[in-house]
């Protein structure tokens, strides 16, 4: 007999409270982006302010990992636009989210993940990874992230 996934809600829609909240956050983000225009000069400033606000709201554990990761991403690829995406730190290229960071506490997972969307040029044969678990930002992890970011940019 199959057991029910504890993360799935008992409501008819099948979404957990965390998933419903992420969808609401995304709707708010889309409205804010439409108001200010994604290409607007203030988009970078506002996007980073939104991202830093989300960082401030995170648990100490998530924040301790994601703050230096944010700094690494911005140092490595400063042309990316920092923003939030479903309430998570994200980085856009030409208006599309290239990569994002899913904090462990966001959906009650074991680890934080660094994920890449379709615009990322990570292609490697017939199959490749697009999401990476991250438990510590070691020098080796930083080197791998820098290499992934450079490859993702094409």
Image (spheres, helix red, strand yellow):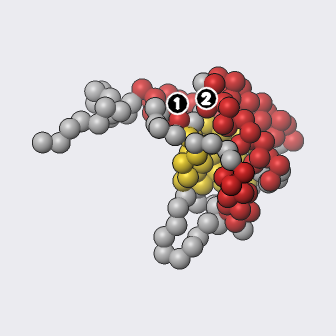
Residue at 47% over, 33% down: 107
Residue 49 location (% of width, % of height): 77, 30
Asked whether residue 22 is in view, the answer is: no
- Element type where label 1 sits in the image: helix
Residue 57 location (% of width, % of height): 64, 22
- Label 1, residues with CA under 10 Å away: few <14, some 14-19, many ≥20: some
Q: Quadrant of residue 119?
A: bottom right
Q: Is residue 77 above or below residue 83?
A: below
- Element type where label 2 sits in the image: helix
Residue at 69% over, 24% down: 56
Judge depth for marks 1 and 2 and give the one in front: 2
75 displayed left or right of 51: right
Residue at 58% over, 70% down: 123
Checking the image for residue 50, the label placed there is none
Sequence order check, earlier mark of 1 and 2: 2
Q: Quadrant of the N terminus?
A: top left
Asked whether residue 150 is in view, the answer is: yes
Q: Is residue 119 above or below residue 69?
A: below
Which one is nearer the viewer's eye here, 141 or 47? 141
Residue 5 location (% of width, % of height): 29, 36
- Which residue is under mark 2? 61
Question: Exactly how many numbered labels are in the figure?
Answer: 2
Q: Quadrant of residue 86?
A: top right
- Label 2, residues with CA under 10 Å away: few <14, some 14-19, many ≥20: few
Q: Quadrant of the C terminus?
A: bottom right
Is there a contact, CB below 8 Å, between mark 1 and mark 2?
yes
138 displayed left or right of 80: left
Residue 31 location (% of width, % of height): 65, 33
Q: Is residue 150 above or below residue 21?
A: below
Residue at 74% over, 30% down: 52
- Which residue is under mark 1? 105
């Amino acid at each position: 007999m199959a057991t029910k996934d504890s993360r799935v809600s008992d409501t008819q829609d099948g979404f957990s409270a965390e998933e419903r909240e992420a969808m609401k956050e995304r709707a708010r983000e889309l409205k804010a982006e439409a108001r200010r225009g994604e290409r607007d000069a203030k988009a970078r400033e506002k996007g980073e302010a939104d991202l830093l606000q989300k960082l401030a709201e995170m648990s100490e554990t998530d924040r301790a990992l994601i703050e230096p990761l944010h700094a690494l991403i911005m140092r490595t690829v400063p042309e990316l636009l920092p923003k939030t995406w479903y309430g998570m730190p994200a980085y856009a290229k030409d208006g599309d989210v290239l990569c994002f960071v899913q904090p462990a506490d966001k959906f009650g997972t074991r680890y934080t993940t660094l994920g890449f969307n379709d615009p990322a040029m990570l292609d490697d044969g017939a199959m490749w990874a697009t999401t990476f678990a991250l438990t510590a930002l070691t020098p080796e992890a930083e080197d791998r992230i820098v290499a992934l970011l450079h490859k993702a940019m094409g």
